[in-house]
Amino acid sequence: MSIITRVPRGEARARLIEAARSMVRHRGFAATSVDDLCAAAGVTKGAFFHHFPSKEALGVALVDDWTQMTGAMFAAHPYNALPDPLDRVFGYIDLRRELLGQPLPEFSCVAGTTVQEAYETSPPIRAAAERSIRSGFQHVLPHLQAALAAHPVPGVTAESLAQQFQVATQGGIILAKALNDPAPARAAFDHLERYLRLLFGRPAKG
């Protein structure tokens, strides 16, 4: 019988979210039990229910934490400092491609993975995933707005283009999971970049 040592005050919640992030990416939300989470985090079930009244509440907290963590990562990346807004957009795509070099579960989106399972059964988790996906628009939306201000394209909005980035991201991850191969996700970003270069009259990469 394993013995769970007492976690220092203030660490249990963070440990549970960290454990959930890993387990949901590898197993999915439904297959991740409270018992398994507590064992992985090294906390008691009492500690779990002290911080989260239900597994659903943990799911909401997990997705919100993911939104904050990824938002900070993208906001701090050097591509945001490039002088040309379109180069900033291409820098974002380059970063997305770089992330695909990790093992498949590690580049999976926690919000996308969770909402695919719980969008109908858990309105709170679906709402958290919506906040997360919409926040993903903000990673490129200001750069797309600046690019379109400098080079207007009739009938095209920055918002619709930002949404297309999420379509490529989430769709590419689903294909990568289904085929057990990151190549389709990488191809989705390659096609997205080709489209943007054609749209803005930017020459293709040499």
Image: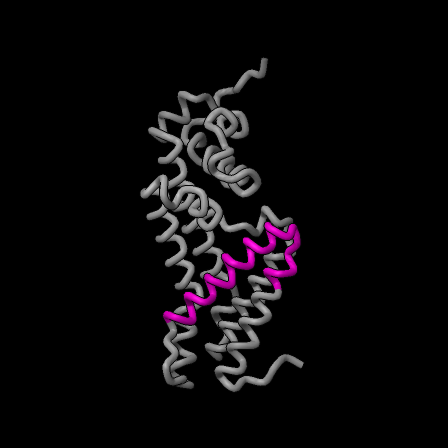
| Residue 49 quadrant | top left
On the picture, is 145 further left or further right than 191?
left
Question: Could you say where residue 149 lies in the image, as x and y percent from the top left?
Answer: 37, 82
Q: Say whether residue 178 is magenta.
A: yes
The answer to which of 104 and 41 lies nearer the viewer is 104
Q: Which residues are magenta?
A: 159-186
Vertically, is 59 above or below 191? above
| Residue 188 quadrant | bottom right
Question: Could you say where residue 115 lies in the image, as x and y percent from the top left?
Answer: 42, 47
Vertically, is 173 above or below 145? above
Q: Say whether residue 32 is magenta.
A: no
Q: Quadrant of the N terminus?
A: top right
The answer to which of 52 and 77 lies nearer the viewer is 52
Q: How many marks overall?
A: 0
Q: Quadrant of the C terminus?
A: bottom right
Q: Residue at x 45, y 47 (%)?
A: 116
Question: Could you say where residue 15 lies in the image, as x and y percent from the top left?
Answer: 48, 34
Question: Could you say where residue 143 lies in the image, as x and y percent from the top left?
Answer: 43, 73
Please identify the dominant SS of the magenta region.
Answer: helix
On the picture, is 166 further left or further right than 40?
left
Vertically, is 49 above or below 117? above
What's the image's color scheme?
one colour
Q: Residue at x 42, y 86 (%)?
A: 151
The answer to which of 106 and 190 lies nearer the viewer is 190
Farthest residue to the top: give it: 1
